[in-house]
Image: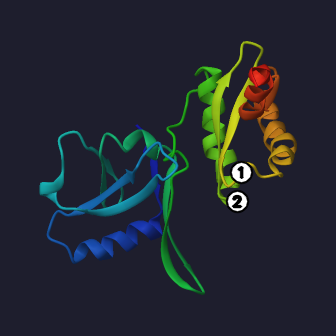
């Protein structure tokens, strides 16, 4: 079984030094707080022997062992822990590309695969503008209906962002499967406007 989490040699050395000051048998625990949500954060803590749960998975590395709880495990797929030293000093970097959403299989339903790309690729780009995109549904015709939330709502750039960037990105990623990407709010208004 390959480790879902890559811990660089530098990071292992860093942890080993810290662990030397801890009680015998202490290792590290890697976890995700709020897994599967926009606020997911990857973290590392000390894991003394008595804190190991029967449902934990243990990953042995050259210099230490890392324990992961069963809830965090699928969200730590392809995670990387590194210890980087630059002009500003040294710091631990944690990358967990699947923390916000567990990795989906290539043969998963289209809806799940599109949702995964939105969460892992589109939303990180929108986050800088305080916005995020939600996938509402994919119609039988292959139209992905999406909704902007946060800072994107009512922003005049939404159309441009949707048309130029996101639609193009998703259409390329799922060519032959998606026919269009539309803003659900606009879609709704169009369909039900005769009620007014």
The residue at the point 42 percent across, 46 percent down is 35
User: In this view of the protein, which residue sits in the foreground, 52 or 122?
Assistant: 122
Locate residue 116, reporting x and y percent: 60, 36
- Which mark's residue is nearer the viewer, 2 or 1? 1
151 horizontally vs 41: left or right: right
Locate residue 163, reporting x and y percent: 86, 40
The residue at the point 66 percent across, 40 percent down is 118
Give the spatial CA distance, label 2 vs label 1: 7 Å
**Does the CB distance between marks 2 and 1 fall below 8 Å?**
yes
31 horizontally vs 195: left or right: left
Locate residue 158, reporting x and y percent: 80, 47
Q: Quadrant of residue 119?
A: top right
According to the picture, the residue beneath numbered tag 1 turns out to be: 152
Q: Is residue 127 visible?
A: yes
Q: Is residue 63 visible?
A: no
Q: Residues within 10 Å of mark 2 (few under 14, many from 20)?
A: few
Q: Which mark is residue 129?
A: 2
The residue at the point 14 percent across, 68 percent down is 24
Mark nearer the N terminus (2 vs 1): 2
Q: Is label 2 in a helix, a strand or a loop?
A: loop
Q: Quadrant of the C terminus?
A: top right
Q: Residues within 10 Å of mark 1 (few under 14, many from 20)?
A: many
Q: Quadrant of the N terminus?
A: top left
């Amino acid at each position: 079984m390959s480790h879902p989490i890559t811990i660089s040699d530098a990071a292992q050395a860093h942890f080993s030094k810290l662990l030397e000051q801890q009680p015998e048998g202490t290792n590290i625990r890697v976890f995700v707080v709020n897994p599967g949500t926009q606020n997911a954060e990857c973290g590392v803590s000390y894991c003394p022997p008595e804190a190991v749960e029967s449902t934990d998975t243990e990953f042995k590395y050259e210099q230490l062992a890392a324990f992961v709880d069963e809830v965090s495990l699928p969200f730590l797929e392809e995670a990387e822990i590194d210890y980087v030293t630059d002009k500003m000093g040294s710091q631990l970097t944690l990358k967990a590309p699947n923390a916000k959403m567990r990795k989906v299989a290539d043969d998963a339903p289209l809806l799940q695969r599109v949702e995964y790309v939105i969460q892992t690729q589109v939303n990180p780009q929108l986050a800088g503008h305080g916005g995020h995109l939600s996938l509402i549904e994919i119609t039988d015709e292959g139209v992905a209906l999406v909704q902007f939330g946060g800072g994107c709502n009512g922003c005049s750039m939404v159309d441009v962002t949707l048309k130029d960037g996101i639609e193009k990105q998703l259409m390329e990623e799922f060519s032959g499967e998606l026919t269009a990407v539309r803003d659900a709010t606009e879609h709704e208004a169009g369909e039900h406007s005769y009620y007014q």
